[in-house]
Image (cartoon, grey):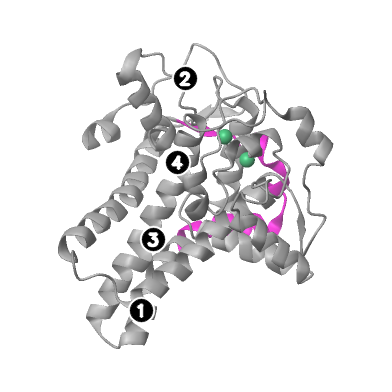
């Protein structure tokens, strides 16, 4: 499968040209697929290694705290930064916080800020219709095989597609922003940083190379693995299975078990109903760590104009 992914030529899609989507050259595609494979297979390898080699030995307190703090930093960068702030502009933030959110989001290794935002805005524009980069409903194969193909495509298969989202079309505001385009250009450096900081911390705290190695496995690779699959589950599971309290014209769903580790992202039907809301958990019982973070930042005076739907707006969209 690996070789097939790398060798497969980009297929032009003559059926219909979709606005805001551009095909990429064979050379660019090859490079992109290699990088994507490395970024997805290496963390998977680390998880398998951690399961087999460390079974029964658990994780040291040092590694646990390194992994947890880097997870919290980067998942907040994704949900509060890349998603709620940069994509949907659901609140206003002071300049140093904008910088921090862009850096934290980049360190999640899900693409540079501008590409992430462009792909996600395209997802909302075409949600579950032709042109959506990661819908689990567009492959026509019938039966269980079709379901699996669709879920695979929405989860991570789409990352290997021979097309890219036109950044000029979907994120002109960020391209014009010198600070954000600067951080976007430095994405490779931030990827190196996200993988090297945990082992450096492990080495500093334990003073041993073994401590450096286990901090790399847990704090860098396992952390990125969990974060990636959490993000991708929003694209696959949360458009496939779960409750739909609001009437929306796509297949978005709320999946409560994913809300804890996704920091609120899995209240995805709420999100499609009110894309510009800074809060994704809208009921008091819908756990949304992103919401609590934004509230704290607001309390500190770093964030203002936090957008959320009114009771009437929510009533109007209620299903059933
Ligand atoms: Zn969605
Ligand atoms: Zn969104």
Image position, residue 118 (x, y; %): 61, 40
For the residues labelled 4 and 1, the Cα–Cα distance comes to: 28 Å
For the residues labelled 2 and 3, the Cα–Cα distance comes to: 31 Å
Q: Earlier in the sequence, mark 4 or mark 2?
A: 2
For the residues labelled 2 and 1, the Cα–Cα distance comes to: 45 Å
User: Which residue: 65% across, 34% down?
Assistant: 272
Q: Quadrant of the C terminus?
A: top right
Tell me the mark number nearer the camera, choosing from 4 and 2. 4
Image position, residue 98 (x, y; %): 69, 62
Q: Earlier in the sequence, mark 3 or mark 1?
A: 1
Q: Earlier in the sequence, mark 2 or mark 1?
A: 1
Numbered range of the magenta stretch: 163-189
Q: Quadrant of ligand 1?
A: top right
Q: Are marks 4 and 3 in contact (CB under 8 Å)?
A: no
Q: Which residue is under mark 2?
A: 138
Q: Which residue is under mark 1?
A: 62
Callout 2 environment at 10 Å: few (<14), some (14 to 19), or many (20+)? some
| Disc on res. 223 | 3
Residue 167 is a magenta residue: yes
From this viewpoint, is residue 169 visible?
Answer: yes
The quarter of the displayed image where residue 218 is located: bottom left
User: Which residue: 47% across, 29% down?
Assistant: 240
């Amino acid at each position: 499968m690996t070789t097939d992914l790398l060798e497969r030529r980009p297929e032009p899609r003559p059926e219909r040209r979709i606005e805001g989507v551009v095909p990429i050259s064979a050379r660019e595609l090859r490079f992109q697929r290699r990088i994507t494979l490395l970024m997805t297979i290496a963390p998977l390898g680390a998880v398998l290694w951690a399961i087999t080699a460390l079974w029964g030995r658990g994780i040291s307190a040092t590694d646990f705290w390194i992994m947890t703090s880097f997870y919290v930093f980067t998942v907040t960068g994704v949900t509060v930064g890349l998603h709620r702030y940069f994509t949907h502009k659901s609140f206003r933030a002071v300049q140093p916080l904008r910088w921090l959110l862009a850096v934290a989001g980049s360190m999640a290794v899900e693409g540079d800020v501008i590409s992430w935002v462009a792909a996600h805005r395209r997802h909302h524009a075409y949600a579950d219709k032709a042109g959506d980069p990661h819908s689990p409903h567009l492959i026509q194969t019938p039966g269980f095989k079709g379901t699996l193909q669709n879920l695979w495509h929405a989860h991570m298969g789409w990352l290997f597609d021979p097309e890219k989202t036109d950044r000029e079309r979907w994120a002109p505001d960020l391209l014009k922003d010198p600070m954000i385009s600067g951080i976007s250009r430095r994405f490779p450096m931030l990827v190196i940083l996200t993988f090297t900081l945990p082992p450096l911390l492990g080495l500093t705290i334990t003073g041993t190379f073994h401590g450096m190695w286990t901090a790399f496995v847990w704090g860098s690779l396992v952390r990125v693995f969990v974060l990636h699959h959490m993000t991708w589950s929003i694209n696959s599971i949360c458009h496939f299975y779960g409750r739909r309290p609001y009437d929306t014209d796509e297949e978005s769903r709320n999946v409560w078990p994913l809300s804890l580790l996704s920091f609120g992202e899995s209240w995805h039907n709420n999100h499609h109903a009110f894309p510009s809301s800074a809060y994704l958990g809208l009921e008091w019982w819908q756990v949304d760590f992103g919401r609590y973070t934004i509230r704290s930042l607001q309390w500190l005076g770093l964030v203002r104009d936090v957008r959320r739907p009114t009771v009437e707006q929510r009533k109007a969209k209620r299903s059933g």
